[in-house]
Image (cartoon, rainbow, N blue to C red):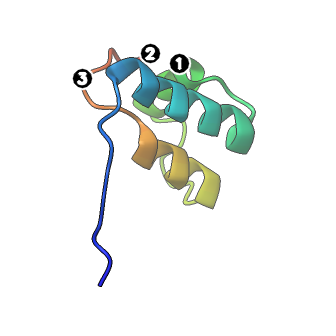
Amino acid sequence: MGGVSFELISAEEQWDIFDDASRRLLDLDGAEFASKRDSGEFVGKDEPGVMQVAILRPSGWPDAG
């Protein structure tokens, strides 16, 4: 049986993954997405791209990156 492996990534790499996904899925940079989400702009919008990017947002980063 195969095992599961994972690799730790740095906080900067986490932000880069989040930012790349936000740009690709929503045409917004990560900081802009974070700011809009924090202000409630996406409330009630259950669009897949919004949800996917929200899940990737790193914890411990300032609200706007």
Judging by the rendered image, the residue that carries numbered circle 2 is 64
Kind of residue at disc 3: Gly
**Disc 2 secondary structure class:** loop
> In 3D space, how far apart are the residues under numbered discs 1 and 2 (Cα atoms)?
4 Å
Judging by the rendered image, the residue that carries numbered circle 3 is 60
In this rendering, position of residue 36 left or right of residue 62 = right
In this rendering, position of residue 2 left or right of residue 60 = right
Taking the spot 73% from the left edge, 39% from the top edge, the residue there is 24
Judging by the rendered image, the residue that carries numbered circle 1 is 31
Q: Is residue 13 above or below residue 3?
A: above
Crowding at dot 2, Cα within 10 Å, few <14 / some 14-19 / many 20+, comes out as few
Foreground pick, 62 / 7: 7
> In 3D space, how far apart are the residues under numbered discs 2 and 3 (Cα atoms)?
11 Å
Kind of residue at disc 1: Ala
Residues at discs 1 and 2 in contact (Cβ within 8 Å): yes
Q: Image quadrant for the C terminus?
A: top left
